[in-house]
Amino acid sequence: TRFRNVTGVQTCALPICQGMCIGNRSVVGKAVVAFSPEEAISLMKPGCILVTKSIDGEYLPAIQMASALVTEEGGLTSSGAIFGLSLDVPVMVGAECATEIIHNGQEITLDRYGRIYRGKVRSSY
């Protein structure tokens, strides 16, 4: 069950997706779901959270604008994890079905424990 207070910030929520998080902070932003580097670069705006199946070097221009990365594939030594660490961007890897569950423009919260929530979630900060 989710509850909202008058400011629109959820105080209790269930995660919609989970994975392994690399980084030590929670992030709230609009999701950009991309299936190619070209799509990611064309859709990305500063502060958005990039959601992809996997990451490689061609995504770098989009990663540089992202407030966080979410990938369905990869682990702690994957390209996404390495890019995130080197650019100080929180990364979630191994987030199965993220590109199916999360939609473009959807506001999501990525917490430092490897969970993604719909909207802004105060309990994850």
Image (tube, grey):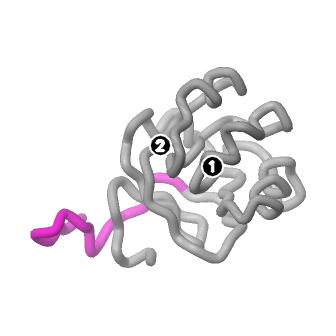
Residue at 19 percent across and 63 percent down: it is 8
Tell me: 122 left or right of 111: left
What residue is shown with label 2? 31
Q: Characterize the magenta stretch by its predominant secondary structure.
A: loop
14 relative position to 3: left or right: right
Q: Residue furthest left?
A: 6
Q: Secondary structure at mark 2?
A: strand
- Cβ–Cβ below 8 Å for labels 2 and 1? yes
Expressed as whole percent of the image width and height from the top left, the position of residue 63 reads: 69, 45
Instruction: Identify the residue position indicated by label 1 in the image.
Output: 70
Relative to 20, residue 17 above or below: above
Q: Amino acid at mark 1?
A: Val
Q: Is residue 101 visible?
A: yes
Q: Give me the residue at 26% from left, 68% from top.
A: 10
Identify the image quadrant of the C terminus. Answer: bottom left
Based on the displayed image, in which of its 4 quarters is residue 62 positioned? top right
- Quadrant of residue 97 within the rendered picture: top right
Q: Which quadrant, please, contains the N terminus? A: bottom left
Q: Is residue 62 magenta?
A: no
Callout 1 secondary element:
strand
In depth, the one of 95 and 32 nearer the eye is: 32
Q: Tell me which segment is drawn in magenta.
A: 1-17
